[in-house]
Amino acid sequence: MDQLEKTERLNQLYELYGVLLTEKQQAYFVAYYQNDFSFAEIAQEFKVSRNAVFDQLNNAIMHLEHYEEKLKLLAKKNDRLTWLKLYEETKDVQYLEKLAEMEEV
């Protein structure tokens, strides 16, 4: 997975689980992954060390991945989008049935 794909995945996880992070983790995450600030810029803004920013971001990523491992909301969302896209391309009702099955679970 390249850096762009990693950033996209993390932003998707943040959309789903970001509210479960601490306020500090949320602020650092948004600054780094959405506003493209450097560690140094974030550290200066929040009056902490770059290492503190690094640690908080690593903890945030660990938590986001843990939530996804347990809840699988992003995987389910991506599965739904795949089935929907296949249906739109083929108009085959089996894909709608797959979507319906997912909703029942």
Image (cartoon, rainbow, N blue to C red):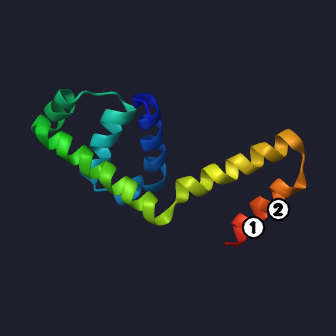
Give the residue at x 15% y 34%.
43
Q: Residues within 10 Å of mark 1 (few under 14, many from 20)?
A: few
Element assignment for label 2: helix
Residue 1, located in which quarter of the rendered image? top left
Give the residue at x 45% y 49%.
13
Element assignment for label 1: helix
- Quadrant the C terminus occupies: bottom right
Give the residue at x 26% y 44%.
57
| Image: 78 above or below 76 | above
Amino acid at dot 1: Glu
Contact (CB < 8 A) between labels 2 and 1?
A: yes
Q: Which residue is mark 2?
A: 97
Residue 2, located in which quarter of the rendered image? top left
Across and down, in percent, residue 93 comes to 89, 55
| Relative to 53, 5 lies left or right | right
Q: How many marks can you see? A: 2
Nearest to the observer: residue 35 or residue 73 = 73
Amino acid at dot 2: Glu
| Image: 63 above or below 34 | below
| Relative to 97, 103 lies left or right | left
| Image: 104 above or below 72 | below
| Relative to 27, 86 lies left or right | right
Q: Residues within 10 Å of mark 2 (few under 14, many from 20)?
A: few
